[in-house]
Each structure stands twice: as C-alpha cells, then as structure tokens.
Image (cartoon, rainbow, N blue to C red):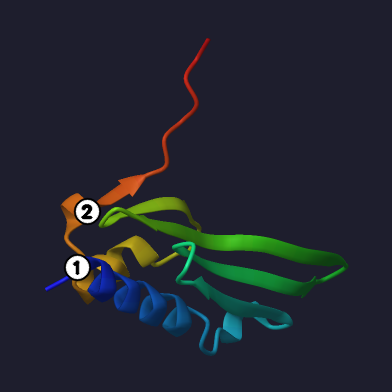
Amino acid sequence: MDRTLNYTDILKKTVQAATIDQPRLQAIKLYPVCDIDSGHFLVLATGWDKQRWIDTILFHARLVENKIIIEEDNFEESLTQALIAGGIRSEDILTSLKPAIA
C-alpha cells in the first residue's frame, strides 16, 4: 500500500476536523487548506479578536517523500498527536529544520 496516499487522506481529514466548530474562538473562523499537489496542509485563522484583526497559520504540515514535516502546530490539543492517532507512524513525523547558525 502506498503510504503517501494514505498519509494524504489522514492529513486532509485531520485538518478538516480541526476547523469544525470552535466555539471558544467566537468571531475567529478557521479554514482548512489542503493542497495535495504541493503537499501543503494548513489551518488558517482569520477574524476579529476584540479590537485586533487576526490572520495567522495555526497549523502547517508538508508531505515530502512519505514523511510529514510539521512547520507549525499551535493547537492546544496538538494536531501532531491527532495525526499519530489517525494512523501516521510517529517516526514519519519530523519538525521543520532550524536554519544553520553561521
């Protein structure tokens, strides 16, 4: 079985599920962005938080050569853990690399 296809489905389902009904966020809306061709999966948050406009990435993962690279995971209940619970092997999840110090 091709893990890439399975991992794509798990990422898409996890990102979409994370955006369903977040009552604590009030006027902030969450949007799933799943670009399967480029391998990018995001959760965007936009809206008014009191007197301030919010437009930020809450979660960003990339699917590269059967590995999931987590760029951002700013959910209280980690989406990384949800990916593992959904069937992605923990050894296939990496965090983004920090730039080399000159």
Label 2 with label 1: CB-CB less than 8 Å: yes
- The answer to which image quadrant residue 52 occupies is bottom right
Q: Which mark is residue 92?
A: 2
Q: Position of residue 16 (x, y in %)?
A: 46, 82
Is residue 90 placed above or below 27 in the rendered structure? above
Instruction: Give the labeled residue for mark 1.
Output: 3
Question: Which residue does the image show at 45% across and 64% down from the upper left?
Answer: 76
**Front position among marks 2 and 1:** 1
Of residues 45 and 101, the one nearer the viewer is 101
Of residues 73 and 92, the one nearer the viewer is 92
Q: Which mark is residue 33?
A: none
Question: Which residue does the image show at 59% across and 80% down from the upper left?
Answer: 24
Question: Which residue does the image show at 47% across and 68% down from the upper left?
Answer: 37
Q: Which residue is most to the right? A: 51
* Label 1 SS: helix
Q: Position of residue 50 (x, y in %)?
A: 82, 71
Question: Which residue does the image show at 43% across and 84% down from the upper left?
Answer: 17
Neighbours of disc 2 within 10 Å: few (<14), some (14-19), many (20+)? some
Dot 2 amino acid type? Asp
Dot 1 amino acid type? Arg
